[in-house]
Image (cartoon, rainbow, N blue to C red):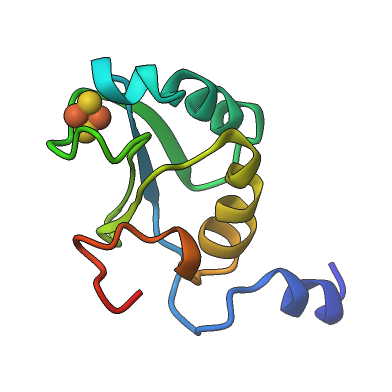
Amino acid sequence: MSNFIQEFNSPATETPSIHRCVRVCQNRTCKKQGAKEVLAAFAALPVAEVTVTASSCLGQCGNGPIVLVLPDMVWYSGVQPHEVPLVIEKHLLGGHRVQKMLYYRFHPQG
Ligand code: FES
């Protein structure tokens, strides 16, 4: 791999790669809001060092579909399937949270 490609694919920060877990709530309320499709969208675009799992209720019913990225403790609310590629590109690959999708309750400043 050339240096250019290596740099292009590296996160902006110099942190060592970490294994992330994306938890997508599949409980009743989030499911009614489209969580099944959100989980499918993550599953369709696998990322190295990232595990995607269906989660039981994350305690934020009504604000779903809720997605929690660990160990970052970043919460996304009202996630739509078409927004999943953005989370993957910016957060999971780029290391930067997607400000406009952050859950206001846990990220009040965005
Ligand atoms: S049903 Fe998803 S947070 Fe409770």
The C terminus appears in which quarter of the rendering? bottom left
How many discs mark residues in the rendered view? 0
The N terminus appears in which quarter of the rendering? bottom right
Residue 6 position (above or below residue 38) = below
Q: Position of residue 87 (x, y in %)?
A: 55, 53
Is residue 98 at least partly visible in the picture?
Answer: no
Q: Position of residue 16 (x, y in %)?
A: 44, 73
Is residue 12 at least partly visible in the picture?
Answer: yes
Residue toward you, 19 or 12: 12
Q: Quadrant of residue 53?
A: top left
Q: Position of residue 14 (x, y in %)?
A: 50, 84
Q: In the image, is 52 to the left or to the right of 29?
A: right
Residue 86 position (above or below residue 54) = below
User: Residue at the spot x=24%, y=34% of the render?
Assistant: 62
Q: In the image, is 6 to the left or to the right of 93?
A: right
Quadrant of ligand 1 in image: top left
User: Residue at the spot x=41%, y=43% of the render?
Assistant: 78
Residue toward you, 64 or 43: 64
